[in-house]
Image: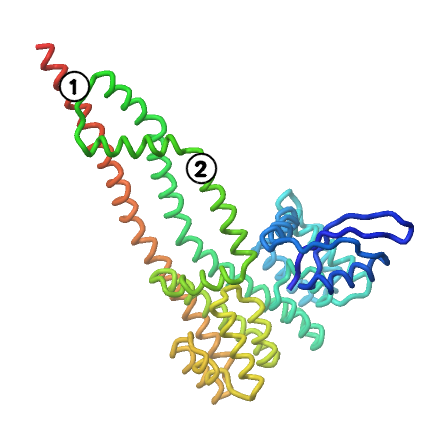
């Protein structure tokens, strides 16, 4: 675990230095020892920053640093693999990718390739160069590169890594598609409702007051509600901003939040199906690739455990890894730990008994990826009529609350004119 520490140092020349350090330690004593050893100074003051502030500081550099998108990473790995398959040295292959990377959208690729070339020219092998850019190359890609360096089959490992990144990108894209359409649709609906509340309804209220109109109770309730929103608009907006900023930071900073959140999501009907399909496809895909590449089971499980962001599965993978260290099989460990469907445990049992575990895991990855796409398509079809119902309900409230009283006023005016 790492934290941010604010410190004041007394240097050997008597001068003081202030700063903030992000250290891979949790306790102040360890941070004090590290700072004194690193700067050859005495720590006068040391303060451990709150977890939320530490998460914000950690997130800042990541937001300013350009990262490769998954499609860019897959393209980079595939280009290097194709050229090295043809016998082109790795350094020349990366130089070719650097030369071909043109346009403002390729800035991240050029930055990554430049750093790779610096590390390779300094004597590092490709796996070590990947490891120095761990924020770009995920754990599976780095592990495959290590195997490629050890076996001399780097071109095969890079192509395997590129295909793997591509499949993961498609799974994540499918999951996002299930959320983007309803998010924009509901945003448009509630944006139109907010326009009515902030701009149209106050004018109607003034009109009703000027004409001394007798309004039905439902209209009065809606007017009172809209007036309350207008009166407290600043605080409501501030609360919304705090939630939009605080929830992601709290999710990032506190593992307890994420643990409870994932536990609740895995019990919610639609979210449970999405998370299960994507999580199981992710685990089966990773494990199949690592075992096929020759990584042992315990190391593979450790890599997957660090790569999975869903704490529901991460905790279970950790317990499975512990049982594997005691000599148990994967399927038996999964059954004991729980949280994995019988389809997965039975197919893994067949793979362990027949020596075709990587093949069975590949079948499982394809099956759960297919289920994920099916769930996404089903959600999209369900959301469309739901959006229509919500929009119609809001429109109906507007008509009943305001247009009908206006119509009554027009009738009364026309009757008085006669």
Figure quadrant of the N terminus: bottom right
Identify which residue is drawn at 42% across, 75% down: 340
Front residue of 297/118: it is: 297
Q: Position of residue 58 (x, y in %)?
A: 64, 53
CA neighbours of label 2 inside 10 A, class few (<14), some (14 to 19), many (20+): few
Q: CA distance from mark 2 to mark 1?
A: 36 Å
Q: Is residue 135 left or right of residue 338?
A: right
Identify which residue is drawn at 73% across, 64% down: 29
Q: Residue furthest right?
A: 13
Figure quadrant of the C terminus: top left
What is the secondary structure assignment of the residue under circle 1? helix
Instruction: Please say if 118 is above or below 155.
Output: above
Identify which residue is drawn at 63% across, 51% down: 62
Q: Quadrant of residue 150?
A: bottom right
- What residue does disc 2 label? 237
Front residue of 204/324: it is: 204
* Mark nearer the N terminus (2 vs 1): 2
Tell me the number on the disc at residue 410. Answer: 1
Q: Position of residue 327 (x, y in %)?
A: 55, 88
């Amino acid at each position: 675990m790492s934290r941010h520490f604010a410190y004041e140092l007394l240097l050997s020349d008597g001068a003081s230095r202030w700063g903030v350090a992000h250290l891979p330690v949790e306790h102040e004593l360890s941070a004090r020892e590290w700072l004194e050893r690193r700067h050859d100074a005495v720590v006068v003051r040391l303060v451990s920053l709150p977890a939320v502030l530490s998460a914000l500081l950690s997130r800042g550099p990541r937001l300013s640093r350009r990262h490769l998108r998954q499609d860019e990473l897959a393209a980079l790995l595939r280009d290097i693999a194709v050229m090295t398959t043809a016998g082109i040295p790795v350094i020349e292959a990366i130089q070719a990718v650097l030369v071909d990377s043109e346009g403002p959208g390729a800035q991240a690729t050029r930055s990554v390739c430049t750093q790779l070339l610096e590390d390779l020219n300094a004597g590092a092998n490709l796996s070590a160069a990947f490891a120095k850019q761990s924020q770009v190359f995920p754990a599976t890609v780095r592990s495959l590169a290590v195997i490629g360096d050890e076996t001399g089959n780097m071109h095969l490992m890079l192509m395997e890594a590129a295909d793997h990144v591509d499949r993961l990108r498609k799974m994540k894209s499918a999951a996002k598609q299930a959320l983007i359409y309803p998010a924009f649709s509901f945003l448009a609906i509630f944006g139109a409702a907010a326009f009515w509340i902030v701009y149209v309804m106050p004018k109607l209220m003034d009109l009703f007051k000027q004409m001394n109109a007798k309004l039905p109770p439902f209209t009065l309730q809606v007017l009172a509600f809209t007036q309350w929103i207008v009166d407290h608009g600043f605080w409501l907006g501030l609360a919304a901003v705090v939630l939009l900023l605080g929830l992601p930071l709290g999710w990032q900073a506190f593992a307890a939040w994420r643990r409870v959140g994932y536990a609740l999501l895995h019990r919610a009907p639609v979210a449970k199906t999405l998370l299960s399909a994507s999580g199981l496809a992710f685990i089966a895909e990773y494990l199949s690739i690592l075992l096929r590449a020759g990584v042992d089971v315990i190391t593979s499980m450790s890599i997957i455990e660090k790569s999975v962001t869903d704490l529901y599965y991460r905790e279970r993978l950790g317990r499975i890894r512990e049982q594997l260290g005691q000599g148990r099989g994967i399927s038996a460990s999964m059954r004991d730990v729980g949280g994995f469907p019988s389809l997965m445990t039975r197919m893994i049992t067949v793979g362990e008994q027949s020596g075709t575990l990587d093949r069975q895991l590949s079948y499982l990855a394809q099956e759960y990826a297919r289920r994920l796409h099916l769930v996404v398509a089903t959600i999209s079809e369900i959301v469309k009529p739901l959006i229509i119902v919500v929009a119609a309900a809001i429109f109906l409230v507007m008509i009943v609350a305001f247009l009908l009283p206006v119509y009554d006023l027009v009738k009364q005016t026309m009757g008085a004119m006669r």
